[in-house]
Amino acid sequence: MAREAREGGRNREREREPGDEFVDKLVTINRVAKVVKGGRRFAFAALVVVGDQKGRVGYGAGKAREVPEAIRKATERAKKTMIRVPMKEGRTLHHDIRGTFGAGDVVIRSAPAGTGIIAGGPLRAVFETLGIGDVVAKSLGSRNPHNMVKAAFAALGSVTSPRLVASRRGKKVADLYGSAAKEAVVEVNDV
């Protein structure tokens, strides 16, 4: 099962329960062995991404002697560490971002409608659970799923919306775009 999760490139999505509003995706499972006097003891480490597909997402890692228990622990941790990401038109990001964590380095760019999710492996799981429909992402650093996911969350934590920036500056959203944007609006209205 660990090989399927890592090499197959497919993320396992759990069936939704009636009262559960979250979607969780299994990013990777790693089997680790501890050598003891009687032989080897195996344990499993799972990385899970959880989101509501409406702008909230979180990740968690869990370790246990059995796979289902590791997944359950990771899911619980992911629900506790959820963040809210502002989205443009409910389908993409407001601006391009870059995030790093350790050796992991990711670039995430907003995309026009109809582009879809152009991202691989762990990043795709993050965007699908987040609810972003149009995004382009590239991993420039480590291919380790843990570092990629943490770098993506570092980047997503820095996303700001025009409304948030305007309120921080004490202005209106229209004031942020300057006179060039106002002239373009005037020209469109004149036609």
Image: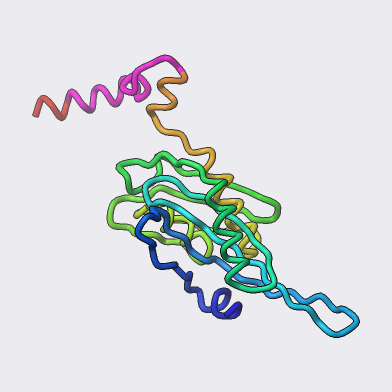
| Location of residue 4 by image quarter | bottom right
Q: Position of residue 33 (x, y in %)?
A: 77, 77
Question: The C terminus lies in which quarter of the figure?
Answer: top left
- Residue 130 drawn above or below residue 188: below
Left or right placement of residue 51 versus residue 111 in this view: right
Q: Position of residue 74 (x, y in %)?
A: 59, 59
Q: Position of residue 157 (x, y in %)?
A: 53, 40
Q: Is residue 98 visible?
A: no
Q: Is residue 183 magenta?
A: yes
Left or right placement of residue 87 versus residue 1 in this view: left
The residue under the point 51% across, 42% down is: 83
Question: The N terminus lies in which quarter of the figure?
Answer: bottom right
Q: Hey, which residue is sitting farthest left in the picture? A: 191
Left or right placement of residue 19 versus residue 58 in this view: left
Q: Nearer the viewer, residue 140 or 127?
A: 127
The residue under the point 41% across, 39% down is: 86
The residue under the point 46% across, 20% down is: 168
Q: Is residue 161 magenta?
A: no
Number of marks drawn: 0
Q: Is residue 49 visible?
A: yes
Q: Position of residue 147 (x, y in %)?
A: 64, 57
Left or right placement of residue 121 versus residue 176 in this view: right
Residues in magenta?
Answer: 169-186
